Image (cartoon, helix red, strand yellow):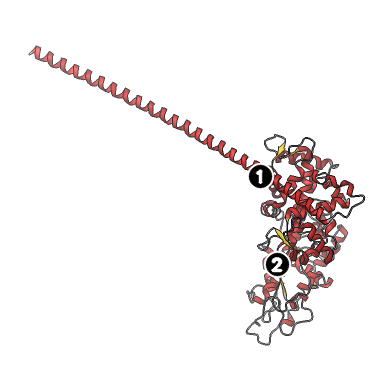
Amino acid sequence: RPAYLLAFNRSKALAPTQQATASSTSDDYLTKREFRLFFVNLVFHVLALDCFAIVDGGGAGVDAGDDRRISPQELEDAAVTTSSSASSPAISAYGFAGLKDAKDGAGAAKVFQKMDANGGGIVLLDEFCAYLIAREMAAKTDMGKELDVDLSAAKSPTPAKKTKSSGGTTPKKPSSRQPPSATKSSTTTPGGKTRTKKKPTVADPAAPQFRKPGPSADLKLFQSALEPLIDLKDPHAKKDRAAAWKNADPNGNGMLSLAEVDSWVQTALVATHRPFKGKQLYKLYRPSYILAFDAAKSLADGGNDDYVTKKEFRLLLAYLNLHADLFDAFAAIDGGGPGVDANDDRRISRDEWMKGHHSVSTYDWAKLHKLTDAEAATVFDAMDADGGGMVLLNEWCDYLIRAEVRAGTATGQLLRKIPKYSSLEDEVAAPAKDDGAAEKARMKEEKRAAAKAKAASEAKLEKERISAAKAAKAQQLEEERIAAEKAAAESKRLEKERIAKEKAAAKKRIAAEKASKADKLEQERLE
């Protein structure tokens, strides 16, 4: 929240009647024309606050140790500790031009001197952000170009009103320092996608974008929760993996069902990234979990085909990360933009693929690297095993995994352990140009088998669910029966007590009548 006011104050001064001020007392409104650049500033200031919070108080997040100001020692400590810590990102890793030299204590000290313009010995959040903005603009980064708006050149000849204009356009006399995207016909949404206006119809591909092609920030966060557990040789990873297995297998039967894996992934993400972000990541990548589970469940000798055993757990973690990576790339194309939104339908059309294949060229998968349009068309045909004109997530994953195994990469070696891909091992040394029809037929058959296995797994889970529901219902009925019996016994006891009291009262009454009659007879005799 502290970042919102800074972003608002910087954005509200962009229209012609506004003055460049950091105070919120002059004109406390945004116009429609300032709205897009408000998002630019909001993205930047939130990211800057996140970095600021790591330094302030000596740890990530906001806690009792934070005082909303940074001392020289705090900046130096952050530069040293976060560079070697897996729990907090290095401040230089945020990508700010102004922090690229803060990789050690000496570098951090020099950066602090530049930040602390008034020499007061502390740096506040607004000073921190102002310094970073100035450095971004000086370095002419993509973000710097978006932030570098000449406020003085944006004045209107009519001071009483702001010039009516659409979200991303410039005044009639734009400054030479206006950001490139402000003169283009595209706007950036909060989700990071670019929407093109009707005029002009073609957006400039050279316009700077905040979300660069390649793996998303969410993917890196997801993978960071599991990566520390995967290393085979690291003793700390082995210890943590054993603890993770214990948490994932609460009933201690030595096997994990899909439901247990699903639940554990959510727990692990929440523990690493706190509830809000953890649950968000869990829901985002959930479609990939069943694919990773199916890949891992039959790896170990004698493994149960419907469960993951402890021997398979490490590879399950690796496959969860890899399938999340595959899903992230899939989502970058599905719907015409990165991330998951209302435009996604869990399938990729030929048009979406041809328009978006360049955006996934930096993912570390052999068949996604720098494809020409002709090569991309061939790849789509190979992916679309059933010729339906659409590529589903399982088809996408299957094709890219096969290509990776054939390429003999380190990832391919890991994925070759999956039984359905183990037969591809001989093709690595001398990859044969398989007949397209045969390849499609094989992939179609494997798709059918995978669908059958998935259906069987889901049927088993449903059967377990119904069985558990029946058991719960039976237990509830038994508890109700016992409660009814107790109530009946109590009622019977009370009835017995009532009858006993009535009998005692009757006896007392009869005795009283007899005594009264005897007294009367005695009195008559005496008379």
Q: Residue furthest right?
A: 429
Task: Specify whether 319 is left or right of 341.
Answer: right
Secondary structure type for disc 1? helix
Residue 352 visible in rendering:
yes
Q: Amino acid at mark 2?
A: Leu
Q: Which mark is residue 42?
A: 2
Vertical relation: 176 (above or below) 473: below
Q: Secondary structure at mark 2?
A: helix
Where, quadrant-wise, is the C terminus in this rendering? top left
Location of residue 272 in the rendering, given as x and y in whole percent from the top left corner: 73, 49
How many marks on residues? 2
Q: Residues within 10 Å of mark 1 (few under 14, many from 20)?
A: some
| Nearest to the observer: residue 201 or residue 14 | 201
Kindly check if marks 1 and 2 are in contact, taking CB atoms under 8 A apart as contact: no
Residue 157 vertical position relative to residue 425 in the rendered view, above or below: below
Residue for badge 1: 458
- Judged from this view, the residue extending furthest toward the bottom is 157
Instruction: Judge left or right: residue 254 versus residue 486.
Output: right
Quadrant for residue 464, please give it.
top right
Residue drawn at (41%, 27%) of the image:
489
Q: Position of residue 184 (x, y in %)?
A: 75, 77
Q: Position of residue 361 (x, y in %)?
A: 82, 62
Q: Which residue type does callout 1 highlight?
A: Glu
As measured in the structure, the alpha-carbon distance from the residue carrying label 1 to the one carrying label 2 is 44 Å
